[in-house]
Image (spheres, rainbow, N blue to C red):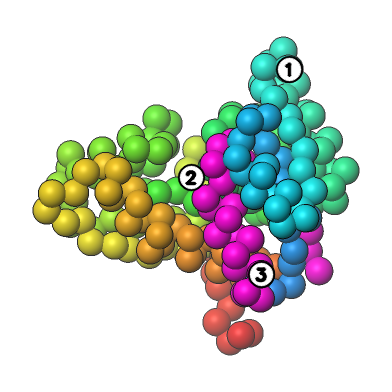
Amino acid sequence: MKNIVVLVSGGGTNLQALIDAQNRGEIKGGKITCVIASNAEAYALERAKNNNIATRVLVRKDYPDVHAYSKAMLDALNEEKADLVVYAGFMTILDETLCRAYPNKMINVHPALIPSFCGKGFYGLHVHEAALSKGVKVTGATVHFVTEVCDGGPIILQDTVPVLNGDTPEVLQRRVMENVEWKILPKAVSLFCEDRITVIDDKAYIDLENK
């Protein structure tokens, strides 16, 4: 059984999707063992406590720089014996030491179809504002491995939703979360815990036979 550690910063809706999937028995081969927040007031901590999941808080301003903060995070992940690290609305920058310590063992969900609307500056509503500004007809979300390149790691899963006339960034954000993010993130976590993802030449391949 793999130890899943989830990193959060805010409300924790993606964390809740993971918890709900776990409670339904949809995450096979792994269990959420700890939630680490960069914000002591994050409601995600309450979600974890309500489900008897251990929590830790590492506040960025308590550390002199990103390197010291990243070192503290790495120490925490090692102490928790993390097999998989999931970014679930984690908005604090970490340096490359984490990626190097956990290669292809850290995943993130991004609210767009990578390589569109991703990279530095594309987060939260900014992603959906950009999609609407461009006039795309479909958008969605991507679960990918975390590397030193922002939103540049191997893609694990993607799915889409239509962009409708009259959409606002808030409406589109909600559609993407409810119909894509909250579904493909738990699915990707389960695939990892079942050892069904292989990375070759920076591309992720899913074993479809081992169901």
- Residue lying farthest to the front in this orientation: 50
Q: Distance between the residues labelled 2 and 1?
A: 27 Å
N-terminal of the two: label 2 or label 1? 1
Residue that appears at 84% across and 43% down: 78
Question: Does the CB distance between marks 3 and 1 fall below 8 Å?
Answer: no
Q: Is mark 1 on a helix, strand or loop?
A: loop
Q: What residue type is labelled 3?
A: Asn
Q: Is residue 129 above or below residue 106?
A: above
Q: In this view, does 167 lie above or below 157?
A: above
Q: What element carries label 2?
A: loop
Q: Give the range drawn in magenta.
A: 1-26
Q: Is residue 12 magenta?
A: yes
N-terminal of the two: label 3 or label 1? 3
Residue that appears at 74% across and 72% down: 29
Residue assigned mark 3: 23
x%, y% of residue 165?
A: 11, 53
How many residues crowd mark 2 within 10 Å: few (<14), some (14–19), many (20+)? some
- Residue lying farthest to the top in this orientation: 64
Q: Is mark 3 on a helix, strand or loop?
A: helix
Residue that appears at 82% across and 38% down: 76
Q: What residue type is labelled 2?
A: Gly
Regarding residue 148, the answer to whether it shows in the image is: no
Viewer-side label of 3, 1: 3
Position of 100 with respect to 8 (left or right) is right
Residue assigned mark 2: 152
N-terminal of the two: label 2 or label 3? 3
Residue assigned mark 1: 63
Viewer-side label of 2, 1: 1
How many residues crowd mark 3 within 10 Å: few (<14), some (14–19), many (20+)? few
x%, y% of residue 52?
A: 77, 55
How many residues crowd mark 1 within 10 Å: few (<14), some (14–19), many (20+)? some
